[in-house]
């Protein structure tokens, strides 16, 4: 039987299709095992923050840092030329106050002396005016925020110097920008015209130059250049007319557009400086001891002028409150380059710490993420829905501040987060985004692919770090040192010590309550038993430990300590100088209580829910302490004098005895304090100052008395006005 050609074709095609399917399955399984594909290679670059006012120190700092980056990139293995991004931020106190000379120096530096850079980019996220606009124009490309503006160049109230016109004109020509536009921004009173030529080109022409322009161009439309404020160029108009390359909402978006490494969107304090490193180890569950230690380490690093801080992290997680505080401490560091070195793991809420650092470096086989539980003591607790949303928002905020992917940070906390990879049509870069980003800006993102499915929290391993845009991978600490130019340099590795453990113990709520109770209760005893004795020493020691521990923990400062001391002085004035418990006494008590409440937390007035809860707990703690002191004082007054050991500490009046027993007029001897009641109306003379307690002599008998009213000097005539048990009250005659 002769088989047909179709049958022969089928015999050849089916085995071929089977082989192709097998190869496809093998490739798919291999790709799934290796994790997400690596991201496209990024260009070296760096952001430099230029905050007004621009000074000569600003110029020197940027010059040293930019030259070092250019030279190091040229000598690198690949020899790529870097992209330099200058982020211009107006000064908060005096925006637009940069001097003309310093601004021109920075403009000349950018346009002349940084030729080794691949590109110079000016990023203007906010409205910028004054002479700081000149270095913006000196950059090769300009990127503006959606609401940013440029100009006017001449500050309000200043005269436009003729020499400045020549400098601005030359700068415009050098950077191929419209000279008349910049001159119109320099002089807001100039008559600047917006003209459209026959070839549909838009030009800015000064009125005095318009006749000459008309000789060589056919103008089809002419109108005033400024629609609103004169000399001000908006981001929309600058983008429309090609003056601005693109608009970006954040440094991270700009870095993605130019394919710059995300962490480079943060200023690098080590550029142009001698590297002075410090190495801090954060190992084990996150606890208050670690928070205290890191705070002290950062303060010491600033005193030592450290500019590179390596945080070696190996933690399974801990308390969300401690993690939040640690992340805030790290994210607020601007004068040091912070590097998170994940030695083994940064899991749970410990993942917030690397996100708060500028750079993240994984040791081979290290992991980060998996924020599902919080650790309190030896027990774990699953996160509630509200806690998940709060921590996810905090992780995304930290990532945005440090240039890490926000979508990846949120996916480490929220299991419902879906991470997508898409091409941004606005910038042309490939980004990791959320589904909400696509919904907020329809049509902006293209070529969308799922990177992480919803349903579980994300854990990023060292092998996946580059693919998720989170950092680099090294074999060990020595390779990390080589990465930052520290190879061969001895660096001391520090960790928490006994002082941190002691401070953490003393700041525990129960221990703080005990210290406050002892301080106040012993102070009451000292006032009842005059004289600097054991109660005064105990009270002083308790208050000293309370404020010392809270000072080192960061919740108390000089203000709280000064308020407490002032309150103590006011109370002493009320008791010993101006008796009567009036304004000095009440003011002293209020100042002391306010200082204790303020020293118990880091904020002055609450603004968030957790701060209100913390303040409520502190007020409850102080109220409970005062109630306990009141109860203790009542028990003390009732039972303390009769105790066999302590009754000797109380000053008792001498028993009434007659010097001349045979005197028939002598009063009978009576045991107990009731024998003093007959003294009412008697007069005597003080033998010591009454502040308000002291001694007075009535005949041949020396009695302990208390003054009613003002301070009474020694050797003053007094009259007994009241007797309350052992307490004899006198007034000055």
Image (cartoon, grey):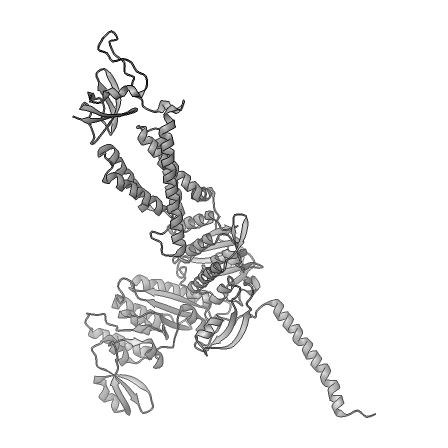
Q: Residue at x 40, y 73 (%)?
A: 119
Residue 441 vs residue 605: left or right?
right
- Give the image quarter of residue 169: bottom left
The quadrant the N terminus occupies is bottom right
Residue in the foreground of this view, choosing between 227 and 264: 227
- Give the image quarter of residue 697: top left
Q: Residue at x 26, y 38 (%)?
A: 585
Residue 12 vs residue 517: left or right?
right
Q: Position of residue 159 (x, y in %)?
A: 19, 72
Q: Position of residue 544 (x, y in %)?
A: 37, 38
Q: Is residue 36 visible?
A: yes
Q: Position of residue 134 (x, y in %)?
A: 29, 72
Residue in the foreground of this view, choosing between 218 and 388: 388
Figure check: 515 above or below 187: above
Figure check: 320 above or below 519: below
The quadrant the C terminus occupies is top left
Figure check: 85 above or below 674: below
- Give the image quarter of residue 674: top left
Report the residue that reaches farthest toward the left.
733
Report the residue that reaches farthest toward the right.
1
Q: Is residue 82 visible?
A: no
Figure check: 526 above or below 469: above
Residue in the foreground of this view, choosing between 334 and 211: 334
Number of on-image labels: 0
Q: Position of residue 121 (x, y in %)?
A: 38, 72
Report the residue that reaches farthest toward the top.
662
């Amino acid at each position: 039987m002769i088989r047909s050609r179709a049958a022969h074709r089928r015999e050849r095609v089916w085995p071929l299709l089977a082989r192709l399917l097998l190869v496809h399955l093998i490739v798919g399984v291999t790709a799934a095992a290796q994790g997400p594909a690596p991201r496209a290679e990024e260009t070296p670059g760096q952001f430099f923050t230029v905050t007004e006012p621009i000074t000569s120190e600003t110029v020197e700092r940027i010059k040293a840092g930019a030259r070092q980056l250019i030279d190091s990139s040229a000598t690198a293995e690949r020899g790529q030329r870097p992209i330099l991004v200058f982020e211009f931020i107006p000064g908060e106190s005096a925006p637009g106050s940069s001097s003309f000379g310093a601004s021109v120096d920075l403009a000349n530096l950018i346009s002349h002396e940084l030729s080794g850079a691949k590109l110079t980019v000016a990023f203007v996220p906010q409205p910028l005016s004054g002479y700081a606009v000149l270095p913006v124009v000196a950059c090769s490309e300009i990127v503006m925020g959606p609401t940013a503006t440029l100009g006017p160049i001449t500050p309000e109230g200043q005269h436009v110097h003729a020499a400045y016109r020549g400098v601005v004109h030359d700068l415009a020509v050098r950077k191929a920008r419209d000279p008349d536009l910049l001159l119109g921004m320099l002089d807001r009173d100039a008559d600047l015209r917006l003209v459209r030529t026959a070839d549909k080109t838009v030009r800015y022409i000064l009125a005095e130059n318009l006749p000459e322009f008309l000789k060589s161009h056919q103008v089809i439309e002419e109108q005033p250049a400024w629609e609103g404020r004169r000399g001000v160029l908006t981001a929309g108009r600058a983008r429309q007319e090609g003056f601005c390359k693109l608009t970006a909402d954040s440094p991270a978006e700009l870095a993605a557009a130019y394919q710059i490494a995300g962490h480079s969107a943060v200023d690098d304090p080590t550029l142009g400086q001698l590297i002075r490193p410090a190495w801090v180890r954060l190992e084990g569950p996150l606890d208050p001891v670690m928070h205290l230690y890191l705070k002290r380490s950062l303060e010491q690093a600033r005193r030592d002028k450290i500019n590179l801080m390596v945080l070696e992290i190996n933690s399974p997680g801990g308390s969300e409150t401690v993690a939040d505080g640690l992340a805030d401490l790290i994210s607020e560091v601007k004068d040091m380059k912070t590097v998170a070195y994940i030695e083994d793991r940064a899991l749970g809420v410990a993942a917030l710490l690397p996100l708060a650092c500028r750079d993240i470096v994984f040791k081979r086989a290290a992991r980060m993420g998996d924020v599902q539980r919080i650790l309190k003591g030896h027990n774990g607790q699953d996160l509630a829905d509200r806690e998940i949303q709060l921590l996810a928002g905090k992780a995304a905020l930290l990532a945005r501040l440090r240039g890490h992917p926000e979508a990846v940070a949120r996916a480490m906390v929220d299991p419902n987060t879906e991470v997508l990879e898409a091409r941004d049509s606005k910038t042309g870069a490939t980004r990791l985004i959320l589904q909400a980003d696509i919904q907020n800006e329809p049509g902006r993102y293209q070529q969308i692919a799922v990177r992480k499915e919803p349903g579980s929290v994300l854990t990023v391993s060292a092998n996946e770090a580059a693919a998720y845009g989170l950092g680099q991978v090294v074999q060990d600490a020595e390779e990390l040192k080589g990465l930052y130019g520290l190879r061969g340099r001895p660096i001391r590795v520090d960790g928490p010590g006994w002082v941190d453990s002691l401070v953490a113990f003393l700041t525990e709520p129960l221990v703080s309550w005990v210290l406050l109770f002892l301080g106040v209760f012993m102070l009451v005893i000292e006032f009842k038993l005059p004289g600097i004795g054991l109660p005064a020493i105990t009270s002083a020691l308790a208050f000293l430990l309370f404020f010392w521990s809270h000072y080192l923990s960061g919740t108390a400062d000089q203000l709280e300590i000064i308020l407490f001391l002032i309150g103590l002085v006011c109370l002493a004035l009320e008791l010993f100088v101006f008796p009567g418990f009036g304004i000095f006494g009440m003011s002293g008590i209020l100042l002391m209580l306010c200082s204790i409440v303020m020293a118990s937390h880091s904020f002055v007035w609450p603004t968030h829910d957790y701060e209100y809860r913390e303040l409520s707990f502190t007020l409850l703690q102080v109220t409970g302490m005062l109630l306990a002191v009141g109860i203790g004082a009542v028990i003390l007054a009732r039972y303390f004098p009769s105790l066999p050991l302590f009754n000797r500490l109380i000053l008792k009046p001498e028993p009434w005895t007659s010097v001349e027993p045979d005197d028939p007029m002598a009063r009978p001897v009576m045991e107990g304090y009731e024998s003093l009641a007959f003294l009412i109306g008697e007069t005597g003379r003080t033998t010591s100052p009454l502040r308000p307690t002291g001694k007075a002599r009535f005949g041949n008998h020396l009695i302990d008395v208390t003054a009613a009213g003002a301070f009474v000097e020694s050797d003053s005539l007094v009259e007994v006005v009241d007797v309350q048990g052992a307490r004899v009250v006198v007034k000055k005659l």
